[in-house]
Image: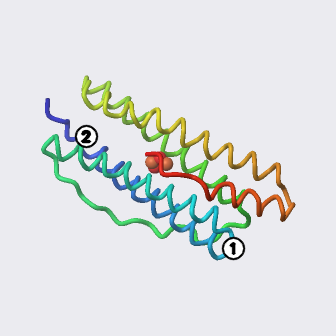
Amino acid sequence: MALSKTMSDALNKQFNEELNSAYLYESMAADFYAKNLPGFAAWMTLQAGEERIHSEKFHRYLDENGERVFYAAIPEPQAEWKSPVDAIKAALAHEKYITKRIHDLVRLARKDDDIATETFLGWYVTEQIEEESTAQSLIDKLEMVGDNKVGLYQLDKEVSTRQQDA
Ligand code: OFO
């Protein structure tokens, strides 16, 4: 079954949104490097890599359905955040925005009676639960540490051990 034009455009838009997510997290990584938090910087760089994988999955799905992919302009991301907790809170807010977009895509697939696309999107629905929960748990840890510099140093070391998991 061919994708509807609306669905094809919406998936293409989401393909670009995922690249935008990668760009945002690369910018956060740059800010963490600048603030001497290499663990958080490495964590964000891995996160950006996951976002590129998310975008590639949309790319492949559109290809497999005989649709052309179009690259849109990516807006300049914020360059600096007040504190590590501020940056991760911004990441969580961004993930919530992405979750809403994914859910809207599922609704569109249902409206089109497009079972294949709805099934494809299921992976993203589950992934978003993990994305939000990971960001939330980092926020919890950062809030626990508060202004304690030694605690932040330890946490930076802990997050540096993150492995690519997508
Ligand atoms: Fe962070 O999940 Fe994709 O955008």
Residue located 33% across and 31% down the image? 108
**Which amino acid, mark 1?**
Asn
Numbered badge on residue 36? 1
Q: For numbered disc 1, what is the local secondary structure?
A: loop
* 105 relative to 162, above or below: above
Residue located 38% across and 48% down the image? 54
Q: Assess disc 1: are there few (<14), some (14-19) or many (≥20) residues with their C-alpha within 10 Å of its C-alpha.
A: few
**Which amino acid, mark 2?**
Thr
Q: Quadrant of the C terminus?
A: top left
For the rendered model, the colour scheme is rainbow
Residue located 47% across and 38% down the image? 127
* 79 relative to 94, above or below: below
Left or right of 1 in this view: 117: right
Of the image marks 2 and 1, the number of the one nearer the N terminus: 2
Question: Residue 155 location in percent, x, y?
Answer: 73, 56
Residue 110, by quadrant, is top left
Give 76 or 37, whichever is nearer the viewer.
37
